[in-house]
């Protein structure tokens, strides 16, 4: 006669118990995996939300800083009519409490130093509408460099002209179509300075900063053909002046002293070097300014760069975007 305890301990019964334990462990493992997955997803979503909110905050901060810099620059222009850069201004001596807001790349700290604002002139060495500026400072003996620029100018000409004739080293619609760029060339004047980056050979031909293209209805002010000293890069300064590395270092140090302590350029340089700079560069402030603001998080892990170009001469109606003069015009605005 078989007892109840004997039945419970049969091999078949033990196998059922073992399978049940395996199934329970399997369900627990799946549940644990799902919990870990959900926690990971929540952590990723939380970090994405933090990054998004921080970037939005930095963007608003940078935009606010650019507007603040714009108004301070307008105030500076109203208080101090002389817009000569790099030299003493007697009218500022009695107004030392007012921080200079000039287009000289001087750094301005905003919002507990989380923002750095800079004002710069937009007149750069190279202008797309003036092809000669591409080879303005290339030596006639440097035939390789001249050939590189001339090849690029062929591409630029074909991109902007309205005919279908191909320059010697240029490209027309058939050439672009073979590359999968059926919408090129524009066959009209460029609307944006950044279009130059689409053209073959620009990296070799463009060795200096390029002036922005004015929006429709706006134009560049009539200024000297000399490049701005405070917007020129170190390499441009050395090329234009044909100076040694040591002299370049002295010049850059003099420019830094002006931006940091308003020490006139001529006071920091030997007379001959100062005269060389004054005769080859423009020191007059433009009526169009570039406002650049760098906004960083407190830990420095994230940064937003906000760039806006505006007219700054209140005596001209072109500073406004509408006929009723209620809104200021913006030439360009970019966020990086």
Image (spheres, rainbow, N blue to C red):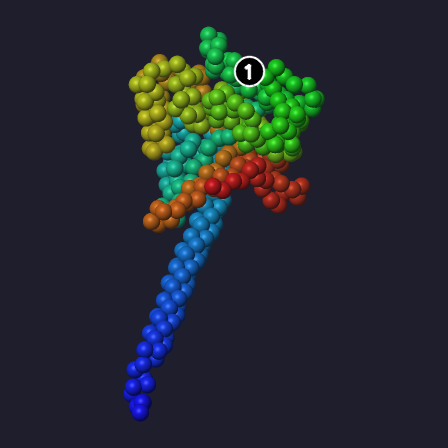
Residue positioned 35% across, 25% down in the render: 252
Callout 1: helix, strand or loop?
A: helix
Relative placement, left or right, of 130 versus 295 is right
Relative placement, left or right, of 300 versus 121 is left
Q: Give the residue at the far right of this rendering.
A: 163
Look at mark 1 in the image and give the residue it sits on.
150
Residue 190 drawn at (x, y percent): 61, 29
Residue 61 drawn at (x, y percent): 45, 49
Is residue 189 visible to us here? Answer: no
Quadrant of the rendered structure where residue 248 is?
top left
Q: Nearer the viewer, residue 168 or 320?
A: 168
Relative placement, left or right, of 257 versus 70 is left
Residue positioned 61% across, 32% down in the render: 180
Above or below for 24 versus 131: below
Relative placement, left or right, of 84 versus 247 is right
Q: Quadrant of the N terminus?
A: bottom left
Residue 102 drawn at (x, y percent): 44, 34
Q: Nearer the viewer, residue 291 or 27?
A: 27
């Amino acid at each position: 006669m078989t007892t109840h305890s004997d039945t419970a301990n049969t091999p078949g019964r033990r196998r059922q118990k073992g399978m049940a334990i395996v199934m329970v462990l399997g369900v627990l493992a799946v549940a644990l995996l799902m919990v870990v997955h959900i926690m990971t997803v929540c952590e990723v979503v939380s970090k994405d939300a933090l990054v998004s909110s921080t970037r939005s905050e930095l963007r608003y901060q940078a935009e606010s800083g650019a507007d603040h810099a714009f108004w301070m620059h307008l105030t500076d222009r109203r208080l101090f009519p002389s817009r000569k850069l790099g030299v003493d201004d007697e009218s500022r001596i009695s107004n030392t409490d007012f921080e200079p807001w000039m287009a000289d790349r001087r750094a301005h700290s905003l919002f507990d130093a989380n923002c750095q604002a800079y004002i710069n002139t937009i007149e750069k060495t190279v202008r797309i509408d003036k092809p000669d500026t591409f080879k303005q400072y290339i030596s006639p003996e440097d035939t390789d460099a001249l050939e590189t620029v001339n090849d690029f100018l062929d591409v630029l000409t074909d991109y902007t002209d309205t005919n279908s004739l191909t320059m010697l080293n240029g490209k027309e619609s058939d050439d672009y179509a073979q590359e999968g760029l059926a919408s090129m060339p524009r066959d009209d004047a460029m609307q944006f300075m950044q279009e130059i980056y689409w053209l073959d050979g620009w990296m070799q031909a463009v060795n200096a900063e390029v002036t922005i293209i004015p929006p429709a209805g706006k134009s560049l002010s009539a200024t000297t053909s000399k490049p701005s000293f405070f917007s020129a890069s170190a390499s441009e300064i050395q090329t234009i002046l044909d100076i040694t590395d040591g002299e370049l270092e002295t010049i850059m140090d003099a420019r830094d002293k002006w931006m940091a302590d308003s020490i006139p350029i001529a006071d920091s340089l030997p007379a001959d070097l100062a005269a060389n700079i004054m005769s080859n560069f423009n020191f007059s402030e433009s009526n169009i300014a570039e406002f650049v603001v760098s906004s960083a998080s407190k830990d420095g892990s994230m940064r937003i760069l906000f760039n806006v170009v505006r007219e700054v001469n209140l005596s001209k109606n072109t500073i406004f975007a509408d006929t009723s003069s209620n809104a200021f015009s913006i030439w360009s605005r970019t966020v990086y």
